Image: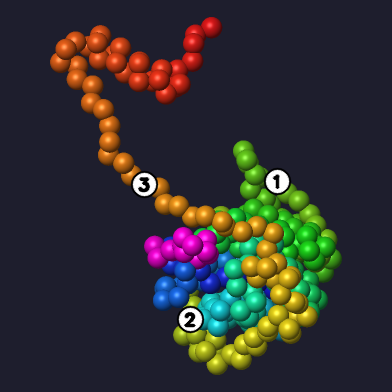
Amino acid sequence: MRIAVLIKQVPAVDTVKIDEKTGTMIRDGVEAELNPLDLHAVEAAVRIKESRPEGEVEITAVTMGPPAALKAVRYAIAMGCDKGLLLSDRKFGGADTLATARTLSRALLKAGPFDLLFAGERATDGETGQVGPACAALMGVSVLSYVSAIDELTEDCVRVTRAVEGGHETVEAPLPAIVIPVKEMNIPRLCTLGGKLRAKAAEIPAETADDLGMDGSETGLAGSATQVVRVTYPKVTRHGRRINAADGLESAIDEIMKVLEDKNCLEAAI
């Protein structure tokens, strides 16, 4: 069985900064890490590998990003993935979720076929949760989101428990399929020394847009269906009006009611 895990290197949550002119994230000189929610996807894949006879399951960690994103791929290998693949090209820069999914799906189809795929619920730098489902749509495979448990996995189908509003539901889908776990599914392991040494020695190929047969109009900023045209930061103001109850409580209440009425915060009683 061949499994692919989509991962992403993201800026550490407390260092996220946006370029107000371009609307894109500033990544240069910013501390980065493997997206925390992707750890659950990697853990789920590795547990499947451990439950099968040795050599029966092969896991490939796939990411799109700058050369520094190799760090995230090596971390996934240290956790238990067998191989890695980096998609890195300046043509990929500025991609929205659609352009990102288009690039990833093209790479997965080229490197595949894969029987099962995993993706994180969302990335902490974008919080969209769109790339995994978009890859499924572009590849023409089933998508199982908000998965809290994998109940059964055969050569032909996968049955999972999904977290839904008010409880859980059990669904089944034919393979290949993309499974998107929630944090409830597992607790990601810590990397062992042996895993880190194996990851350090691993040869991780890097592919460009030309390698995938993609031109500039399909990916990156040019291939994006959406663009951030303006970024603003909320401004905290301290201007206000003080209503003093020293002149009488009734007078203060009348003043407060007048303020609320002026701001259309009150509805007339029926």
Element under label 2? Answer: loop
Q: Which residue is mark 2?
A: 192
Q: Earlier in the sequence, mark 1 or mark 2?
A: 1
Q: Nearer the viewer, mark 2 or mark 3?
A: 3
Element under label 1? Answer: strand
Q: Which residue is mark 3?
A: 235
Residue 247 lies, in percent from the top left, at: 16, 12
Q: Earlier in the sequence, mark 3 or mark 1?
A: 1
Q: Is residue 223 above or below residue 111?
A: above
Q: Is residue 10 above or below residue 247?
A: below
Tell me which colouring the rendered structure shows.
rainbow
Q: Which residue range is magenta in the image?
A: 14-25
The Cα atoms of the two marked residues, 1 and 2, are separated by 35 Å
The Cα atoms of the two marked residues, 2 and 3, are separated by 45 Å
Membership of 20 in magenta stretch: yes
Residue 89 lies, in percent from the top left, at: 63, 80
